[in-house]
């Protein structure tokens, strides 16, 4: 039994029944363990939900970092390009969309998760702002939020996302 199996079961239950129907008993049943076995990995349901939040953020940051490493060091908009391409990669992955959707449900119902996500937003904006300025960084952030929402609702596709990100990159490269 791994933490990741519990997080995956949590995501699945949240998507099927909603975060308010999530119980440790349901998670244990889905994974095929007893409820007390969950406590080996997580102190309580709140801790499990924060585990889901941190897993989602780490996966997100990992993909953006991978995209950053692919870009040349002399790219004046290296972080912006990595941020856009990393998000595009994730928007093209149904499993990652599912993970983010589960994490967003936790975000809505959990102040601690809200604070963690707020820190991620602030960090992303702090990295982009020196390259493109505050307004353009906000434009990218808001646009991607809308794309993520559309992807989670099943009304956004990869080709549209690619077109929007290509357009955003062109805008960002203009003076």
Image: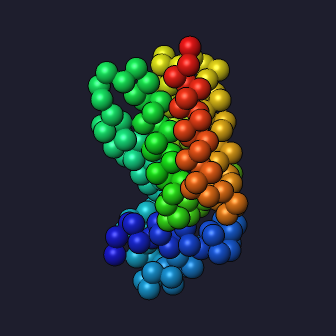
Quadrant where the N terminus sits is bottom left
Q: Nearer the viewer, residue 113 or 43?
A: 113
For the question of whether residue 68 can be seen, the reply is yes
Report the number of numbered marks. 0
- Say which residue appears at 62% left-offset and 58% top-offset: 157
Image position of 96 with respect to 172: above or below = below
The answer to which image quadrant residue 73 occupies is: top left
Can you give x and y, in whole percent of width and height, for residue 9 in the image? 50, 73
For the question of whether residue 50 can be seen, the reply is no
- Say which residue appears at 52% left-offset and 22% top-offset: 173
Q: Nearer the viewer, residue 120 or 158?
A: 158
Quadrant where the C terminus sits is top right
Image position of 161 with respect to 16: above or below = above
- Say which residue appears at 65% left-offset and 29% top-offset: 139
Can you give x and y, in whole percent of width and height, for residue 147 in the image? 64, 48
Which residue extends farthest top? 175
Can you give x and y, in whole percent of width and height, for residue 42 in the image? 43, 63
In the picture provided, is 25 more to the left or to the right than 16?
A: left
Protein image colouring? rainbow
Image position of 63 with respect to 16: above or below = above
Image position of 79 with respect to 43: above or below = above
Can you give x and y, in whole percent of width and height, for residue 112 in the image? 58, 45
Q: Nearer the viewer, residue 121 or 34?
A: 121
- Say which residue appears at 39% left-offset and 66% top-offset: 4
In the picture provided, is 132 more to the left or to the right than 39?
A: right
């Amino acid at each position: 039994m791994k933490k990741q199996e519990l997080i995956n079961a949590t995501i699945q239950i949240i998507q099927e029944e909603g975060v308010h129907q999530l119980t440790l008993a349901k998670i244990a049943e889905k994974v095929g363990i007893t409820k007390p076995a969950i406590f080996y990995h997580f102190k309580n349901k709140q801790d499990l939900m924060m585990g889901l939040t941190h897993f989602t953020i780490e996966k997100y940051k990992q993909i953006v970092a991978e995209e950053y490493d692919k870009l040349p060091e002399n790219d004046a908009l290296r972080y912006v390009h990595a941020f856009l391409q990393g998000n595009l990669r994730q928007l093209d992955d149904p499993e990652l969309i599912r993970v983010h959707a589960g994490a967003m449900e936790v975000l809505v119902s959990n102040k601690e998760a809200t604070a963690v996500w707020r820190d991620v937003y602030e960090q992303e904006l702090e990295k982009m702002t020196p390259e493109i300025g505050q307004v353009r960084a906000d434009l990218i952030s808001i646009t991607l939020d809308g794309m993520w929402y559309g992807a989670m609702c099943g009304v956004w596709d990869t080709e549209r996302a690619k077109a929007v990100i290509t357009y955003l990159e062109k805008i960002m490269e203009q003076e």
